[in-house]
Image (cartoon, rainbow, N blue to C red):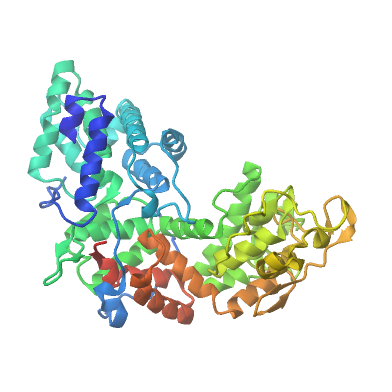
Amino acid sequence: MSRTIAARPGSPVVVVASILALVAGCAGGHGGKGGGDDDGVGDSAGTGTDAGDTEDVPAPSGVFADPDALGPTGLRRLSLAELQAALVDLTGLPAPEIETMLAVLPGDGSTPFDNDETLQAPSAPFVEGMFSLTEAIAARTIDDPDRRDAILGCTPAGADDVGCLRTFVAGFGRRALRRPLDAAELDEYATLIEHAIADDDFDVAARMAMQALLLDARFLYRVEIGEPVPSRSDLVRLDAYELATRLSFLLWGTVPDDALLDRAAAGELDDAATLAAVATDLLRERRALRQIQRMHALWLGYDTLAADPALAASLRAETDAVLERALADGAWSSAFTADETWLDANTAEHYGIPLPAGEPGWVAYPDIRRRGILSHGTLLSLGAKFGDTSPTERGKAVWTRLLCNEIPPPPPQVDTGLPPTGGSADACKTERYDMRTKAECSGCHGILDSVGFGLENYGPLGEWRTTEPDKAECSIAGEGELAEVGAFAGAGALGELLLDSGQLEGCYVRNMLQFAVGHHPTDDDRPLLDALTERFESTDDAAALLLELATSEGFRHRRFE
């Protein structure tokens, strides 16, 4: 691809063709890749758990030792969030600046995750946007003297310093492509020095090399060629660098750092004990915590909040803090029943709960109905509709996102974009939401609305209320029912019922696995999904769950579609 850019620096058409060719060649797992020996060229306090003792870790057994326990995976492109994180790590540019630059690219779909491979078909708008994006990033990075000096890894002696160019490509390319470049690849990139000589400016070649690497399909896609498994034409074992890439994107949401690539080169990902130690080290880092928190936010639908930015940030910080404590304690379910929460000045005022000594910190809930993350403004924001809350939308969120149940679409003649019209003009909400009385609607609304009305004491962002907005005569009972489990009043009691239902943990594992593999779990994924669910139900440890997945043979192999 570097030859393409050097020959026709303004031609995204050639780049499109190159990416399409790689997708066609690699989606089934066949084709060549660069490799060769390494040519020489985190935060702390992550989840707060060791995720188990990795000393004398036994080899995976049972389903966890079966390469076929995980179904086929396709060729996955980096999501915009992964792309942003990778570019920040590779270039050192500020995240907000790169986020602004990413606006030239089409958005990701949501299923509810943003990394679904089935929505990632290559398109000309995406590649043309990438061409503009990488051109801007290369210029912004190389044109900044301090950043340029930090990223080159050498000091060019002049415009013709091909040795410095090779050093830069070897180092930056190893991080970007997640493997060492071989001699032939370095020779190819070295030809870009001709453009630097022609312009008497070394930076011309550096910019072109950076852009070429960032446009390489092996940067944009998680290419997994693997090593053949005897007697199998549909299965390969990932090499050390491919496994390091899987680990890094699963646990950190970004490219591997040099330390992880070094550990891959040293063979530390080759057996169960050392792989477990590496994965545990990754989980200890702060970015692992942020990755798990982000997965929860996508799963439960609060990754983007329609609120004042300062309040939105505070609400997100509250939920992140409760999740962090639950993860550190190895007690994931406690996030749904916690009788304390973390508040700052914004959330304290929002909820009407005083801060201890006026400083941000942990606060005991003053009302038994406000317990766990279900009482947070983050999760309760899912019910905002028609300028108020929708019992139906809140019930649907609980029923589908937290319990993984399905709801059939409404009848074709029903317009869900219109406010409910039951009762008189000044009727209270229990009368306006009268769909439970209609035969064609009662089945679903009887389930959903019964859940939603049990959360009506919370406003669109979780603020407490006892009457409907602008209707003091309409008092809120706040009583609901979770079908086939029991009645409840408030978020704390609902959290208890969700745990009692026996579905919450399994739904979480299903979503975690979907996030990990980039598609909805299928029957082919069922063996590992069931085994992970059984383990999680017995341990309640989300970090250990990720470790179990990362060290399984299914995760270390790739089956072709």
Name the residue at the top extreme: 199
Residue 444, how many percent across, how many down? Answer: 65, 67
Residue 194, how many percent across, how many down? Answer: 12, 23
Q: Nearer the viewer, residue 293 or 491?
A: 491
Residue 427, how many percent across, how many down? Answer: 87, 56
Q: Nearer the viewer, residue 147 or 139?
A: 139
Left or right side of 215 for 84? right
Identify the residue at horizontal 35%, vertical 77% (top origin): 527
Residue 294 visible in image: yes
The picture quadrant where one finds residue 519 is bottom left
Identify the residue at horizontal 53%, vertical 68% (top origin): 404
Left or right side of 170 for 319? right
Residue 222, how many percent across, how many down? Answer: 28, 52
Image quadrant for the N terminus? top left
Left or right side of 304 for 124? left
Identify the residue at horizontal 77%, vertical 58% (top origin): 464
Left or right side of 238 for 114? right
Q: Nearer the viewer, residue 364 or 308?
A: 308
Q: Nearer the viewer, residue 65 or 483?
A: 483
